[in-house]
Amino acid sequence: MAKVQVFNLKSMSVQPYEHREKNVFYQTKEFKARLIELPPKGEMPPCEMSSYVLFYGLAGSAEIRVGEEIFILKEGQCLIAEPATLTMRTAHGVRILGIQIELGDSLK
């Protein structure tokens, strides 16, 4: 039988950005899932991502810069980006599911 886990993303506690590795709640060699939460007027500094990234807005909204392009991610929306430099900021606070998908032959 396949291993299956269910996670309640609305009730999981989230650590500040400085302790972001503690927000990873599932990880394999192919992908990593984490929660990202920024307070009102919060920012995530530039992050050079070598993997594909999927962000799903759980609550609030954020401005996400992917390279030179800016996108607004709202609750219920999904952003998928190829490897790039990412930054994020929010005016009123945001909670996001982030999934990093590693490059490689395993997904072919």
Image (cartoon, rainbow, N blue to C red):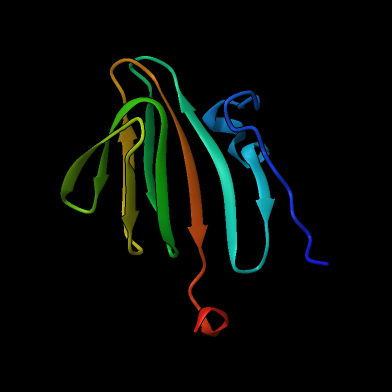
Q: Nearer the viewer, residue 17 or 37?
A: 37
- Residue extending furthest front? 1
105 w.r.t. 40: above or below: below
Q: Is 9 on the left or on the right of 46, as rendered?
A: right
* Residue at (53% x, 85% y) in the render: 105
Q: Is 23 on the left or on the right of 100, as rendered?
A: right
How far across and down, in percent of the image, does residue 106 sit?
Answer: 57, 81
* Residue at (20% x, 41% y) in the render: 71
How far across and down, in percent of the image, does residue 60 sit?
Answer: 36, 22
How far across and down, in percent of the image, does residue 21 sit?
Answer: 63, 42
* Residue at (34% x, 55% y) in the render: 80
How far across and down, in percent of the image, does residue 75 sit?
Answer: 35, 30
103 w.r.t. 92: above or below: below
* Residue at (52% x, 68% y) in the render: 102
Q: Is 88 on the left or on the right of 51, as rendered?
A: left
Which quarter of the rendering shows the N terminus?
bottom right
- Residue extending furthest left? 69
50 w.r.t. 18: above or below: below
Q: Indicate the quadrant where residue 57 lies.
A: top left
- Residue extending furthest right? 1
Q: Nearer the viewer, residue 74 or 91?
A: 74
Number of numbered discs visible in the structure rendering: 0
